[in-house]
Amino acid sequence: MPSPSPLPTPTLIQLAAKHAGACLELDRAALGGIWSLAQWQRELEEKARPGLGLRQGQELLAMACGWLVVDELHITLVAVAPGHRRLGLGSRILQELMQAGRRSGATRATLEVSATNGPGKGLYEALGFRTAGIRRGYYRSGDDALIQWVNLKT
């Protein structure tokens, strides 16, 4: 029996307000619904808030969003569709966002990750992030957040 053909490589897209519905769907599926549709629309309209996605056909498979503050990129969200995890999409979309931040003048990037999120912590560590502090009880679940930073200078 022949092996199935590999899926085509997802296309990188710049997220815009027209993608708010797809972002909301992925947010709900991957993260349990962090933001409302109105919050997604505001997020995607702000120039200082870069957002990138990986799309296959019309399906949004992964996304990463951030906020540029002077020379820092604060990464606000990284999400990968549950059925497409462990395929390198999280790493790819986060590296693309970090590169976009670098092109916009960011010299460092920061994010918060749940202390109990093993896969997330592994991804961020592989990309050079290091823990610099803890926010106790940061998440709705009561989990602590690890504050992580990486240098974006090349």
Image (cartoon, rainbow, N blue to C red):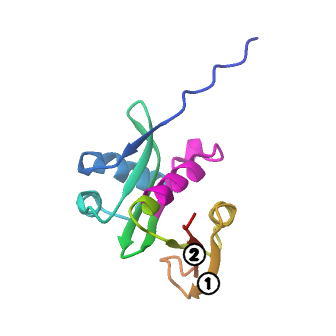
Q: Which residues are magenta?
A: 77-100
Tell me where residue 102 appears, x and y as whole percent.
Answer: 46, 62
Q: Residue placed at 62% from the left, 63% from the top?
A: 120
- Left or right of 47 in this view: 107: right
140 and 106: which is toward the camera: 106
Residue bearing the label numbered 2: 149
As for residue 89 lying within the magenta part, the answer is yes
Q: Quadrant of the C terminus?
A: bottom right
Whether pointer 1 and pointer 2 mark residues with C-beta atoms closer than 8 Å, the reply is: yes
- Left or right of 60 in this view: 151: right
- Left or right of 131 in this view: 73: left
Residue bearing the label numbered 1: 132
Residue 97's place in the image compared with 7, above or below, is below
Q: Main secondary structure of the magenta part?
A: helix
Tell me where residue 66 appears, x and y as whole percent.
Answer: 41, 64
Residue 3's place in the image compared with 124, above or below, is above
Q: Residue placed at 30% from the left, 46% from the top?
A: 19
Q: Residues within 10 Å of mark 1 (few under 14, many from 20)?
A: few
Tell me where residue 73 appears, x and y as whole percent.
Answer: 44, 70
Classify mark 1: helix, strand or loop: strand
Q: Quadrant of the N terminus?
A: top right
Residue type of the residue flagged with mark 1: Ala
As for residue 112 lying within the magenta part, the answer is no
Chain-order first, disc 1 or disc 2? 1
